[in-house]
Image (cartoon, rainbow, N blue to C red):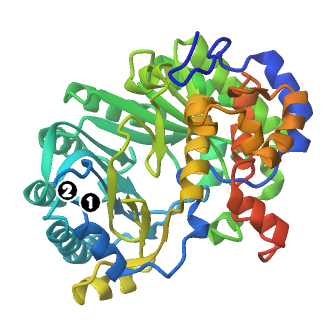
Amino acid sequence: MTGPDGTTQGGDRPPNDADLERAVELASKYDRPGPRYTSYPPAPHFHEGIGPDEAAEIYRSRGADAPPLSLYLHLPFCEEMCTYCGCNVIVSRNKAIVDRYLESLLPEIDLASELLSGGNRQVIQVHLGGGTPTYFPPAAMERLHRHLQDRFEFLPEAEIALEVDPCVTTPEHVETLARLGFQRISMGVQDFNPQVQEAVNRIQSVDLTLDLVRGARAHGFQSVNIDLMYGLPHQQLDTFQQTLDAAIEHIAPDRVSLFGYAHVPWLKPHMRKIDEATLPKPTERLALFQAGVRSFVAAGYEFIGLDHFAKPDDELSIARREGSLHRNFMGFHTHAGTDMIAFGITGIGDAQGVYLQNHAKLTAYERDIAAGKLPIHRGYRLTEEDRVHGAIIQELMCNGRVGRTHLAPDGGDWRERFPAEAADLGPMVADGIVELDADGIRLTPLGRLFVRNVSMVFDTHLRAREASGDGDGKPRYSRTV
């Protein structure tokens, strides 16, 4: 079977038990900190040389022929802190903070909309992330959504999605969101085991989760997705299998994200509450992940890549089969070529080849909005080299292969264009992780477990940082195994 750029897709199966056995043998060799590549270069390379003025100019530069927009809104509040959380959140039980946040968020939307008014303001994708978006009362969520609809043109086929916490999401939330046109809902589960839930401060029963799922489906949500997590404290293979069985049998989600817990207490101080002695070892983490692969594949799900699964008729599965899957700050998606505009603290946009990130501190964010400025704190303008290497990494992460279109558009042998990368891939060929020829690179089923490591070979920023010895010695990223 040949892919759209001439690469072979034969043998593109999920990793099996034999692959896991081999992965365990290779774990110590490849287990290292590495990016997840929701952007290239990753966010640690953003700098403060790009701010409000540059962002305003980028927004004004979009013409009528500009691509449609993806809108991301970061709603950062949570009632409690889950100790595994790697997101940018504000913990508060005082719901009055919602009104304070809207007093800046709505004007930010107005400001961006006005700057974008000279170009295409059609919207193909909206995603509300957090934090916990359903921390906002239903009336506040409706006010926010109506405001967006007044300022932008939502296409009829626009995908409108959000993340929710079953512990705080009410039937009124579900009814309101469905009425507003939300079609996709994603909810955290992590693990149903009581000991694990206690250790991560996330108490959530199967029945509570199932009530929300049934409510969402009854109100016409087209897709119900769940997040699971492996590598959490006290996780054991037998008890995690019970979580997997419950998710498949009772919830039957359309998509599943099976994230590996990233223990980075030097970046997220609340993670210090986790007893590191209770965390699974790398080989145990692999066994937990493989239990997920085995269970979801046996239940008919397709292994999309990295840590995602979807039912065969889901658009992610279709896109991967067609070689048109993409990845951005919202994860895997099918809306390629959009400009992403982000609202709210820490939100990261991607417009006209420039990454733009908002202030992380609420006070700084509010200050800029009050001054009539976009709250952009830092960013990064892509170079041509970034575009080339980013496209290669995108293909590896999303489609498990990369061919001449990206490696050698002139028709030559790509190994002559990327000699250092080809040399670094040599040991991975010997280990059975990748297959190479003059036409391209293909991940083996085993290699799909090490896709981040393969992608890192083409990360010139990472290569330069390691060569220079730059940094404080503390990893910027989670470990790859």
Q: Are marks 2 and 1 in contact (CB under 8 Å)?
A: yes
Query: Residue 178: horizontal and vertical position, in percent?
Result: 18, 38
Q: Quadrant of the N terminus?
A: top right
Question: Upstream in the sequence, badge 2 or badge 1?
Answer: 1
Residue placed under numbered mark 1 in the picture? 136
Secondary element under disc 1, as helix, strand or loop, is: loop
The foreground one among 333 and 75 is 333
Query: Residue 53: horizontal and vertical position, in percent?
Result: 32, 82
Query: Residue 457: horizontal and vertical position, in percent?
Result: 75, 47
Query: Residue 476: horizontal and vertical position, in percent?
Result: 70, 65
Quadrant hosting residue 18: top right
Q: Quadrant of the C terminus?
A: top right
Specify whether 20 is left or right of 407.
right
Residue ID at (27%, 32%): 216
Q: Is residue 397 visible?
A: no
Position of 331 relative to 45 (above/below): above
